Image: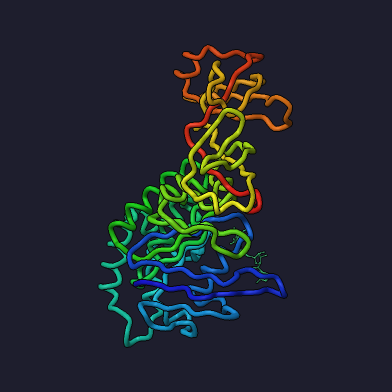
Amino acid sequence: MSIEVQNISKKFAGFTALDNINLEIHSGELLALLGPSGCGKTTLLRIIAGLEKADSGKIIFDGQDSTDTHVSKRQIGFVFQHYALFRHMTVFDNIAFGLNVKPRKDRPSQEVIREKVMALLKMVQLDWLANAYPSQLSGGQRQRIALARSLAVEPQVLLLDEPFGALDAKVRKDLRRWLRDLHDEINLTSIFVTHDQEEALEVSDRVVVMNHGHIEQVGSPDEIYDTPASPFVTQFLGDVNLFHGRIQDKHFTSGDFRHEISQHSAHFSGAEAIAYIRPHDIEISLDATNALGHGQIEHIHSIGPIVRVEIARDSQDENIEVVLTKERFRTLGLMPGDNVYVKARKVAVFDPASV
Ligand code: ATP
């Protein structure tokens, strides 16, 4: 099922939670809503679900205006951060619940329900836990059961609100890979809320980056990461170093450094520009040719396979952070106190007025 979000706005007591959101969700895709706490992700999800009413705008399911359709008629499955399993029911009964409460005329026979629940338990790879109670399950197992329960009523759309938010890092990682595989198997249209960049980039077909109630960028994980549309997206997706410079002849220039920019210089309101550069896109060098900056190595931290080097910039407060492979670090033979130049492999250049 495809979903269109058209001009959706929502205020809470004068506070704008969503400001004219427009978004198309393709049938069968896994879409991540990504953004910092309070940016409006959950509110948008709840409006799509029909759990919250927008002040204005429309929600279209498969070409049909469903803005006023009751939540129970939207054929949506939910999974929330905090496991919403019934504690007094076994895993089997939890999954069967949505089928057992259907009106008598729509309710499948107990035999069909049994087959269906067991098939779902196999799908989430927990069939051996059919008779367990939620208190006997781990957090990750509970979320897989919550997902099986949401799928029992055969929804057209699956909405997941930080489903793995309460789990520890290792379980989260396993579960998000598992969710991706499961999504590919059942091919439901799914929307996934997260504030975890890595999770969004790893799991989804497309990512919607939100900030203060509006959409900053929509794109594939690679597009979002490689060509961020705004300073916000660049900074939200990971650590960056900022270098101030100028726009000259379609190039960003700073000291001896020149970098051709893809955006036309007309995008810049003045001659000033800021380059955003990720720590692993910076190279350390002892030679000044085309260098972007210069400084003295202050700290060296070895973290597993990588080395993080902090360089105190000449005449500036903020340090430059560089990430090198251990091999590259050894080749360079760097020591704290060394005077070095930095060069950039890849930069994103923005107008200071857009920051
Ligand atoms: P988080 O990741 O922390 O859940 P979010 O991006 O999902 O954040 P929302 O829960 O959508 O953000 O909230 C957006 C804004 O709207 C927040 O500032 C929140 O305080 C406010 N808000 C949400 N629901 C209500 C409500 N029922 N009443 C008042 N304000 C609300």
Residue nearer the viewer, 327 or 241: 241
- Does 240 sit above or below residue 13? above
Residue nearer the viewer, 64 or 320: 320
Q: Residue at x 70, y 32 (%)?
A: 318
- Does 341 sit above or below residue 11? above
> Going by the image, does 58 lie left or right of 206?
right
Image quarter where ligand 1 lies: bottom right
Q: Residue at x 37, y 70 (%)?
A: 96
List the single residue furthest toward the front. 249
Which color mode does the image show? Answer: rainbow
Residue nearer the viewer, 126 or 32: 32
- Does 348 sit above or below residue 316? below
* Observer able to see residue 172: no
Residue 91 at what x, y percent from top left?
41, 61
Residue 286 at what x, y percent from top left?
55, 16
* Observer able to see residue 300: yes
Residue 271 at what x, y percent from top left?
63, 45
Residue nearer the viewer, 62 or 261: 261
Q: In which quarter of the image is residue 254?
A: top right
Q: Which quadrant would the N terminus be assigned to in this image? A: bottom left
Q: Which residue is drawn at 53% across and 26% down?
A: 290
Q: Tag count in the figure?
A: 0
List the single residue furthest toward the bottom. 105
> Going by the image, does 136 lie left or right of 245?
left
- Does 242 sit above or below residue 100? above
Q: In which quarter of the image is residue 112?
A: bottom left
Residue 141 at what x, y percent from top left?
43, 52
> Going by the image, does 122 lie left or right of 11?
left
